[in-house]
Amino acid sequence: MIENLAGDATFLLADQVLPSRQSPFGIFLIDIPAIEPGLVNLRVRGGGMESDPVTLRVAPSDNLFVQNISGQAFYQKIDVTDAGLDLNHPVMVPIRNARIEVLSRSSQSIVSVSQTDQAGHFEVPVSFDANLTVRVVSRLRTAGLRVADNTNLNAIYPISIDIDGRQPNLGVVLADTSRVSGAFNILEIVQRANETIRGADPSIDPSPLTIFWSTKNTRRTGNIAQGFVGTSFFNVANNTAYILGDRNDDSDEFDDSVIAHEYGHMIAARFSRDDSPGGETHLGDVLDPRVAWSEGWANFFSAVVRNDSIWRDDSGPSGVNVYRFDLRDRIPAGDRPGYWSETSVGTLLWEIYEGSDSTGNVRYPFSEIWTAFSDLRNDRFVYLPYFLEHFAARYPAAIDALQAVAQLRSIDFRANVRPSVTMPFPRPMAGNTVTGYVDSVTPHRTNLLQASHYWSFTTTGGAASIRMDITGLGPAGNPNANDLDIFLMDMNGRLLDRSDRGLNGQSELISIRLPAGTYVVEVRGFYIKAETGNVVFNSGDYRLTVAVQ
């Protein structure tokens, strides 16, 4: 029974939200589920604040606890410097909020559980047993967040020590100096990310997540149980992630920049909108604007989580190579600024967040950026100008700052005009016919702005004829790679029809009856072979005609 709380109170046992109900007298009744024996923290959230934890002692059925033992848990952090993975100067870091387990070696069962605090300290009750093991494992007390080994039957990682429960409590130190520490660093960075978004919106409850990491995880693709994961990535569809760990090739368990970046993509898909088709990116790319927004946002989010504008990603044997950039560098050498630039997106967001002469030295807190970011959830074909529009609508006093930082990156953003940039994405058709060229052959890339064109048109409805004629070979000049296709979508991005007959140098036609509305036509310069999954790159000049009667 809890008294004297506001009506929006939320109760958490460890990290589990508890069902509760409020009586007419302001008293909350909480339904507490079955709890493992040990110590567990009860907290209350309400009014944007959170209480200090109250520790509950849960006795086993035989009530055999005789004393509490205390201790502290650490992992060995390897920093990434401008010279690479700094293996010669490891730092011991507390393991926060992790599950503590006491095992009976006699019965091979867990007899008591607890969790570490913000400094890695813990207290856990034990029985009068000479054969006990205390361990901290790579998960929170509840199963909401855990790091597991995909090459070892998805086991979680432990750091353990054997104790004699009959002896007086002298304090226990759980410390690791092996590569197991990598699992706990991943756990730490994702916790920081969750704390960052909860700081922006206390009502957020991140979804359960299992992150798979192994020292065998390599950039090869194939059997995941053998470590062939391809790259580090998060999968929002099933709330999982895979992190590279092969130090002979590329390991990411201490690449905090990468971990927070990849989690930033999951956050975007969960709480905002991410329409990016993905793919590799490089400095100087003129990207599909959806890719630029997605990658730039993730770079920015990573920097906020780490409180560091500098990105460092080590690779190569023992992490000797480093890829580095600084979000304070507005237009680095080789960049092609614009809303198609991942760099422009990331540096613009950081400049808003950190403040500069261009913003009148006003710093806009992450909570305000998060609010506009969350507003994107109802948009489609999401790119940077949409975010700027939402931010300007939420915070009109920021309009001058937004326009200034955008113009520094060759983006002619106008807050009170629609469309808000001269060349929006998708681009509205001027008349019934437009021309252009697409080319994925020259770069062998499908996520560049030149690989596909997106055109929008608005109609009062009727019988529509959408015809694309291939009028030339395009920049690649290859008659055998001159197969362009067209795809018709509504403004939600839902595919309505397509014409992809596989004809070089000819035409594609969609005939369909459309209700009134706005639609998007993609002229695509590549296709994927269904039988192999391989990408076939094409190039061509085209003429697109839309007629609705």
Image: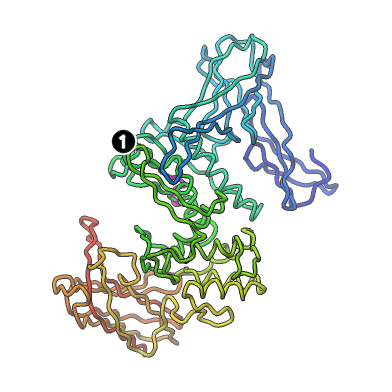
Q: Is residue 245 left or right of residue 541?
A: right
- The residue that appears at 52% across and 11% down in the rendered structure is 106
Which of the pair 231/166 is nearer the observer?
231
* Placement of 474 over or under 526, stated as above or below: below
Q: Position of residue 339 (x, y in %)?
A: 45, 71
Give the residue at mark 1.
226
- Vertical relation: 459 (above or below) 299: below
Q: Looking at the picture, how far across and down is residue 380, in whole percent?
A: 47, 69
Q: Amino acid at mark 1?
A: Gln
Question: Which quadrant does the C terminus fall into?
Answer: bottom left
Query: In this orientation, which residue lies closer to the viewer: 40 or 61?
Result: 40
284 sits to left or right of 369: left
Using the image as rendered, state which of residue 203 and residue 93 is in the foreground: 93
Farthest residue toward the left?
Answer: 480
Stretch in magenta: 236-243
How is the model colour-coded? rainbow
Quadrant for the N terminus in the image: top right
Label 1 environment density (alpha carbons within 10 Å; few <14, some 14–19, many ≥20):
some
Residue 518, position as x, y percentages in the image = 45, 80
On the picture, is 53 further left or further right than 389? Answer: right
Quadrant location of residue 342? Answer: bottom left
Could you tell me which secondary element the residue under label 1 belongs to? helix
Given residues 316 and 468, the one toward you in this image is 316
485 lies above or below 25: below
